[in-house]
Image (cartoon, helix red, strand yellow):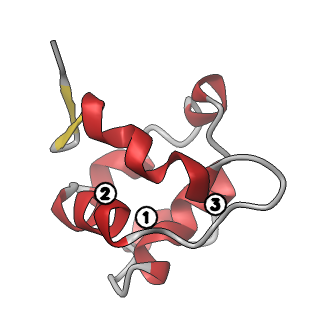
Amino acid sequence: MAISICNIESSKMNLCLPAVSGKSPTQPTEQCCAVVSGAKLSCLCSYKNLLPAFGINPKYALALPKKCGLETPPQCRGS
């Protein structure tokens, strides 16, 4: 059973994993950007300190909105 975090179903989070993990992350796919565009980005920023526990690099994660052509919320910038 999937849970929803910041308007993203947990079952869809893996679509962005290649773009936010490892030493050389890939560019986000269209599917990943679709997930990001439906997310409450300001909500996600509040979880940035927990991301490493899931194998997600916060720096890469916070760069996703811009890479997907979205505006990064002010509270997420410079983090």
Mark 3: few, some, or many residues within 10 Å (few <14, many ≥20)? some
Secondary element at image label 3: helix
Instruction: Identify the image quadrant of residue 13.
Output: top left
Residue at the right extreme, as displayed: 23
SS at badge 2 = helix
Mark 1 residue element: helix
Q: Are marks 2 and 1 in contact (CB under 8 Å)?
A: yes
Q: Please, what is the three-letter code of the amino acid marked with disc 3?
A: Tyr
Asked if residue 12 lies left or right of residue 56, the reply is: left
How far from the left and from the top, in percent, is residue 55? 65, 32
Give the quadrant of residue 12: top left
The residue under the point 28% across, 30% down is 10
Q: Which amino acid lies under the numbered mark 2 shown in the image of this protein?
A: Ser
Which residue position is annotated with label 3?
Answer: 60
Where the N terminus falls, by quadrant?
top left
Q: CA distance from mark 2 to mark 1?
A: 7 Å
Separation of disc 2 and disc 3 at Cα? Answer: 16 Å
Q: Which residue is mark 2?
A: 42
Residue at horizontal 45 percent and vertical 37 percent from the top: 47
Residue drawn at x 53%, y 62% as measured from the top left: 62
64 shown above or below 14: below
The disc, 3 or 1, on the residue closer to the chain's N-terminal end is 3
Nearer to us: label 2 or label 1: 2
Badge 2: how crowded within 10 Å, few (<14), some, or many (20+)? some
Q: Nearer the viewer, residue 25 or 37?
A: 25
Q: Are marks 2 and 3 in contact (CB under 8 Å)?
A: no
Which residue bears the numbered disc 1?
Answer: 75
User: Which comes sooner in the sequence, label 2 or label 3?
Assistant: 2
| Image coordinates for residue 35, horizontal then vertical, percent | 25, 57
